[in-house]
Image (tube, helix red, strand yellow):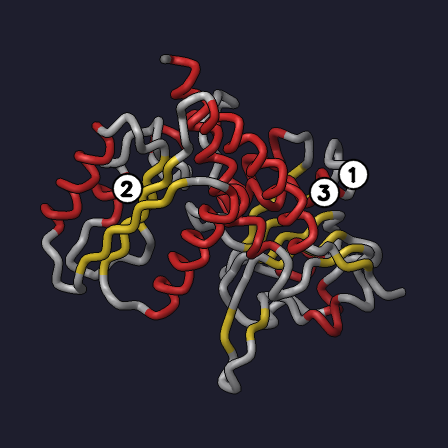
Amino acid sequence: MTARILDGNALSAKLRGELAEKAAALTARGTQPCLAVILVGGDPASAVYVRNKVAGCEKAGIKSLKFEYPQDASPADVLGKIAELNADPAVHGILVQLPLPKHFDEKSVLEAISIQKDVDGFHAENVGRLSQGQEAFVPCTPNGVMEMLKSENVSLRGAEAVVIGRSNIVGKPMAMLLTAAGATVTVCHSGTRDLNFHTRRADILVAAIGKPKFVTGDMVMPGAVVIDVGINRLPDGKLCGDVDFESAKEVAGLITPVPGGVGPMTITMLLANTVESAQRSAQKT
């Protein structure tokens, strides 16, 4: 058996087309969705991510503002810019690209962003609201995974789901979303004893551990849905995920590739959250 490929590029293109229509309608009524992106330092990967986010905004009819700071920037200057953007009614989303330089307190920077404009869904209050099933901006990557599962009509109620990884950005919110959808969720990590025992009983296996080709085919239950959140660059420059795609695809029923799987959906959900924020703003005026 060879797994069907869950194409994130195709789904992303469809959803971005719908978002562009919503953005155009909002703009026609006087509210153009606007995302402000803050980049601190010269990390090449971060620069690429920001460039992709800005390009995604432009294609969807979302206005983008980019603010770049040097590696040795003062945290006070960045916090001042966040305060300014919080107060600007024309800005609907604020994103601070991570990681930040070591002299920054990442938590304080993220929590300086207004929860109404926290389109990354990283603010502690948004995370708390998500955990209680209240309206909240959902972190983009796990939200993108849920959209992918929905697009394939994957049954979640009663399903066994295993998430490998417990980060605040992916692992924890992913587990919360799957739980809310009715799955029975096990969260594993690099220190989990007998990891294979857990992964081999998973109807849905989400790999977000940050280790290249960590999940191999012998760790996958036949017919399982395998979602690869990882993105790693190998010594030869090629990209791969946290799943050994070649061996896993021979066992799984449905699998995401890297690149072209979850990655495009992350930016799409960022755009969706920005449009949602603009819609909320328009309703208040």
Q: Is residue 180 left or right of residue 109?
A: right
**Mark 3, secondary structure of its residue:** strand
> Does residue 201 sit above or below 82 in this rendering?
below
Residue type at numbered disc 3: Glu
Instruction: Give the spatial CA distance, label 3 vs label 1.
Output: 16 Å
Q: Position of residue 102 (x, y in %)?
A: 20, 61
N-terminal label among 3 and 1: 1
The circle drawn on residue 110 is 2
For the N terminus, which image quadrant? Answer: bottom right
Can residue 198 be seen here? no
Looking at this view, is 47 or 195 the one in front?
A: 47
Q: Position of residue 62 (x, y in %)?
A: 44, 40
Q: Position of residue 51 (x, y in %)?
A: 40, 59
Residue underneath mark 3: 160
Count of numbered tags = 3
The circle drawn on residue 153 is 1
Q: Name the residue at 64% across, 58% down.
A: 261
